[in-house]
Image (cartoon, rainbow, N blue to C red):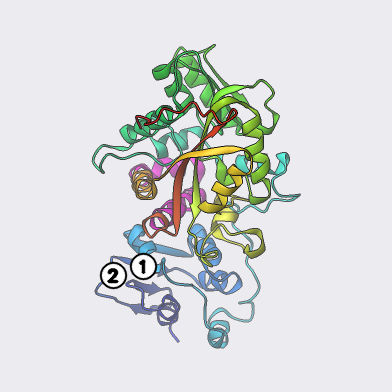
Amino acid sequence: MPIADLLASVLDGAPLSIRAYDGSEVVNPEAKATVVVNSRDAVRRFMTAPNDLGLGRAYVTGALDVEGDLLEAMRAVGPIDLRFDPKLLPELMRLTGVDGLKPLPHPPEEVVLHGRRHTRERDAAAIAHHYDVSNDFYRLLLGPTRTYSCALWADPTVGLDAAQEAKHELICQKLGLRPGMRLLDVGCGWGSMAIHAAQHHGVDVVGVTVSSRQVEAGQQRVREAGLEGRVDIRFQDYRDITDGPFDAISSIGMFEHVGRQRLAEYFADLRDLLRPEGRLLNHGICRAARGGDARSPYLPKTRRRRTFIDRFVFPDGELHEFGTVVSAIHQQDFEVRHTETLREHYALTLQAWLANLEANWDRAVELVGLGRARVWRLYIAASAVGFESARLQVHQLLAVKQDGGRSGFPLRPAY
């Protein structure tokens, strides 16, 4: 069977064209992208790690490529469980030779962490793999705000920078920040939220991250903004903070790294760092409530499998169903006061990041190498489609540490 026809059977009628190294081709007149199989290594990688991990390895190494609109290609394959029929194994073996089932060496961009999950040491290693890449690369990808989380779009035309500033302002309003307050920003990234809160709301901010590159850039941005003494960016695990209490806590895009087994500890630690009537804003990605989507890159521990996201992008990342998160925070004596879903906003944000990457592709490759640039291109496009299709969600959850039934909330908050 020609390679193109074989792949077409795996893709189950997806509106894609296919071209393969053996000269075979499947042309779909409705296709907006073409999958290009450049070598038999692509077939071998899929055989030895079916579904998104094998195809991801093939894409990162260049054995598999996509011509045309990558987002449309991801939309086409999104609903498909990419597993080959065992009946095709003899044909696959014929095409790849007797070594077809012998795994190829993993690409250098792939990581396998060791030790117990979600210890301080392993969490630091997971964060370093993803964030300690290149501050210049992240500036290129994220734009001037250097904000690596979902923006808030009034409409798709406002631009990424304005949308990120709007997100920061919304969080400040939800937290009720006022001059003289102390804010803790957990997983502060490159300091964008901390700087915004100090500049526009007069608060003193402690931002913590376990990425050394983020601390370096964040501290420099604080100095450039003239906020030394007002904003303190630290290399510190949130579990090691001892100088509370704080009036408010923001946790934006960090929650995905906590892990299911640490949920209770996470919310309890943040509760203990808050003063009575203090507010917590938890902004994080959740998975759809479908009993654990078999195609989701983040699954409960009992159903975990090797995935492209886990090996190449977010080692040990875990997403939870939103109801589980609400229950977990209630069990730690918080009262949830407001929730907001920003799913469509994240799809727009990811599309903007992908546009930045494509517009600066040569520079991105220069900064991080071709393989890692391809990792980011694939991960961002696939994630955008995940939010479009509602397989992935993002929620802002606002909670308060009650004080004998007193919440400190106005009857009708302005936000």
Find residue 31 and name its label.
2
* Secondary structure found at label 2: loop
Q: Amino acid at mark 1?
A: Ala
Report the magenta stretch's main SS. Answer: helix
How far apart marks 1 and 2 lie (CA) works out to 9 Å
Residue at the farthest right position: 115
Q: Please tell me whether residue 263 is drawn above or below residue 289 in the rendered image.
A: above
Q: Please tell me whether residue 102 is drawn above or below residue 400 in the rendered image.
A: below
Query: What residue is shown with label 1?
Result: 76
Tell me whether the residue at label 1 lies in contact with that at label 2, contact meaning CB atoms closer than 8 angstroms.
yes
Toward the viewer: 207 or 184? 184
Q: Which numbered disc, 1 or 2, marks the residue that appears first in the sequence?
A: 2
Q: Residue at x 35, y 46 (%)?
A: 345
Can you say which quadrant of the picture contains the C terminus?
Answer: top left
The picture places residue 228, in percent across and down from the top left corner, at: 52, 12
Instruction: Using a 10 Å C-alpha cutoff, classify the residue at mark 2 as few (fewer than 14 neighbours), some (14 to 19) or many (20 or more).
Output: some
Q: Please tell me whether residue 52 is drawn above or below residue 154 in the rendered image.
A: below
Can you say which quadrant of the picture contains the N terminus?
Answer: bottom left
Instruction: Using a 10 Å C-alpha cutoff, classify the residue at mark 1 as few (fewer than 14 neighbours), some (14 to 19) or many (20 or more).
Output: some
Residue 378 falls within the magenta-colored stretch:
yes
Q: Which stretch is magenta?
A: 356-385
Q: Residue at x 35, y 78 (%)?
A: 25
